[in-house]
Amino acid sequence: MRIMLFGEPGVGKGTLGSRLSEKYSIPRLSTGDLFRAEIAKSTPLGQKVKEYINSGHLVPDEIVLEVAKQMFSVDYNNGFILDGFPRTVPQGEAFSAILKEHDWKMDAIILIKVQIEEIIRRLSARRQCESCGASFNLVSSPPKVAWVCDKCSGKLIQRPDDEPQVVRERLSVYQEQTNAVVNYYRRKGLLKEIDVTGLSVNESFESLIKLIESS
Ligand code: ADP
Ligand code: ZN
């Protein structure tokens, strides 16, 4: 199963993508998680991308394409969940070439939608473990102890790019750059869309599974 997830920041791509990854026993490939791990380890790549990410801008295509090349040098025989790539038209073109090279076809290309008011609410309540990256939400999935990770007891922080001003920047970057990629798949009739405004994580996940398996 090869699944691609699109959606504005905060629609739950990471959470739903992780659930899909468990259900289908396939890896979730997230460029955002990969970059954040590099930043946490302060690697040369992490240092290069940190400023872009923390200010809500996209990492330049040449860096992303280098990372993508490595990401897809592995043979994902059972498939993968793609979260956060491609995000620009050149990345979309590069990804088409990768598919062709491996003789792969996508099984589902999905756009997850949530009303803007809810996006803002969710992102301001999001907390993430500094050590293991686990995600919490003060409203919908609060940690057992405030500011402490349930999984590894690490410290919970707010992602720097979840600050309100940076969120606005990320939303406008999405409109300006990623929408074009989404529209490309929509025009080709390959895009399935789902609105999960007001739904719980479980309800969103159920609807998503139905949509994926309806093809
Ligand atoms: P979200 O989708 O919630 O904004 P991600 O975790 O997917 O968050 O990405 C966080 C940040 O990482 C993005 O705002 C961007 O700076 C960077 N990033 C991730 N993937 C890409 C990509 N494919 N191209 C450019 N930048 C990316
Ligand atoms: Zn943790």
Image (tube, rainbow, N blue to C red):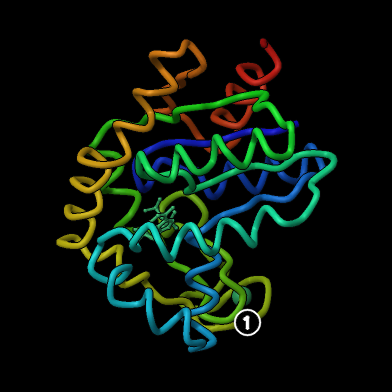
Taking the image as shown, residue 170 lies to the left or right of residue 202, namely left
Q: Nearer the viewer, residue 55 or 164?
A: 55
Tally the marks: 1
Find out if the beta carbon at label 1 lies less than 8 Å from the nearest ligand 2 atom: yes
Q: Where is the N terminus found, in terms of image quarters?
A: top right
Q: Is residue 67 left or right of residue 73?
A: left
Name the residue located 20 percent from the left edge and 40 percent from the top edge. Answer: 176
Image coords of residue 154 (percent x, y):
58, 83
Label 1 sits on a secondary structure element that is loop
**Relative height, residue 92 to residue 135 (above, below):** above
Amino acid type at image mark 1: Ser
Give the quadrant of residue 23: top right
Split into quadrants, the picture shows ligand 1 in the one at: bottom left
Label 1: which residue?
A: 153
The one nearer the camera, 186 or 28, is 186
Up the image or down, 77 lies above or below 152; here it is: above
